[in-house]
Amino acid sequence: MITPKHDNYLVRATAFDGKVRALAVNSTEAVRELARLQSTAPAASAALGRVATAALLLGSTLKKESHLVTVQVRGGGPVGTVLASANGRGEVRALVGNPRPAVPEMVDGKLNVPGVVGSTGRLTVIKDLGLREPYNSTVELVSGEIGRDFAYYFARSEQIPSAVGLGVFVDATGQVEAAGGYIIQLLGGLSDDEVETIEREVAALPHPTTMIRAGETPEDILTRVFHGSFRVLENTPVRFHCPCTRDRAERALILLGPAEIDAIMAQQAQRGHSDVTCEFCGANYRFTLDQLAALKN
Ligand SMILES: [Zn+2]
């Protein structure tokens, strides 16, 4: 089953008179592209896709489209660091330290996400809100399965009780067939009965990719929880996008300083140029020795 491109969007909604925030996304195409760019094996694709999907969901809560959220998961497992950045326009990029860790891909019929991520590290959320200092918060990982780790992050760091579902389904050929997720947050002021109702409906939700593979939209997922009593605030297409440019590669080189640039020039004297490759998208920016020398001033 190939999900058409137009199905890939994120819904930001509210329910119970603003006392509940509800987010749901179909991120299939973006995650498929991330897995292709990072050449990930299935379990690493799932880890990458879950973190990227969480970043997209978090990105939709930013006040301005230009604001940026970066999620960093360091679980001590063989995949290394999983990192994803998303903005309020539904654009995401992500990478993994080791795309093909040597661990079993499946455990108990599930992609071995905790096995590649590890479960003894940290989850860090960095929000760049255009201020001098970015907002930065770190919690310990509780499972390495990502969804539960984010629920813990929201409870611990933002004091918001949240249900988080994140999923990536990889087909027999290793291609990402479905990806998506939801976050339901209780913002306060709900009665015990209301909380109980929401918790019951969320607990009854099928796995995110079960719903997406069955053709359900983000609105369909929210309908399962709120039975139509929710208000969509925003509907944003989501996609992979890397904002790297030659200018930024140049600035990164300048930041290294003259001594480091000299070292690169000495190293690359024979080839006559140095390549700066973007780790996120693979774009290559070539600098000749003359161009490098000019960056020292
Ligand atoms: Zn790039």
Image: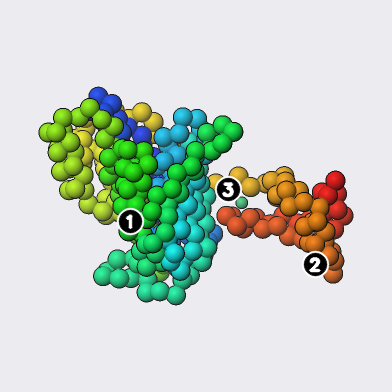
Q: Earlier in the sequence, mark 3 or mark 2?
A: 3
Q: Residues within 10 Å of mark 3 (few under 14, many from 20)?
A: some
Q: Is residue 206 left or right of residue 121?
A: left
- SS label for mark 3: loop
Q: Quadrant of the N terminus?
A: bottom left
Q: Which residue is mark 3?
A: 242
Between the residue at mark 3 and the residue at mark 2, the CA separation in whole angstroms equals: 29 Å
- SS label for mark 2: helix
Q: Is the shortest distance between ligand 1 and the CB of mark 3 under 8 Å?
A: yes
State yes or no: discs 1 and 2 in contact (Cβ < 8 Å): no
Residue drawn at 31 percent across, 37 percent down: 160
Point out residue 43 in the picture as x, y percentages from the top left corner.
39, 65
Q: Earlier in the sequence, mark 1 or mark 2?
A: 1
Numbered mark located on residue 267 in the image: 2
Between the residue at mark 1 and the residue at mark 2, the CA separation in whole angstroms equals: 44 Å
Q: Which residue is mark 1?
A: 142
State yes or no: discs 3 and 2 in contact (Cβ < 8 Å): no
Residue drawn at 34 percent across, 52 percent down: 149
Residue drawn at 17 percent across, 36 percent down: 195
Can I make out residue 33 in this image? no
| Residue at the top extreme of this rendering | 17
| Residue at the left extreme of this rendering | 193
Q: Nearer the viewer, mark 1 or mark 3?
A: 1
Q: Earlier in the sequence, mark 1 or mark 3?
A: 1
Q: Nearer the viewer, mark 3 or mark 2?
A: 2
| Rendered position, 17 above or below 55 | above
Q: Nearer the viewer, mark 1 or mark 2?
A: 1
Numbered mark located on residue 190 in the image: none
Specify the amino acid type for callout 3: Cys
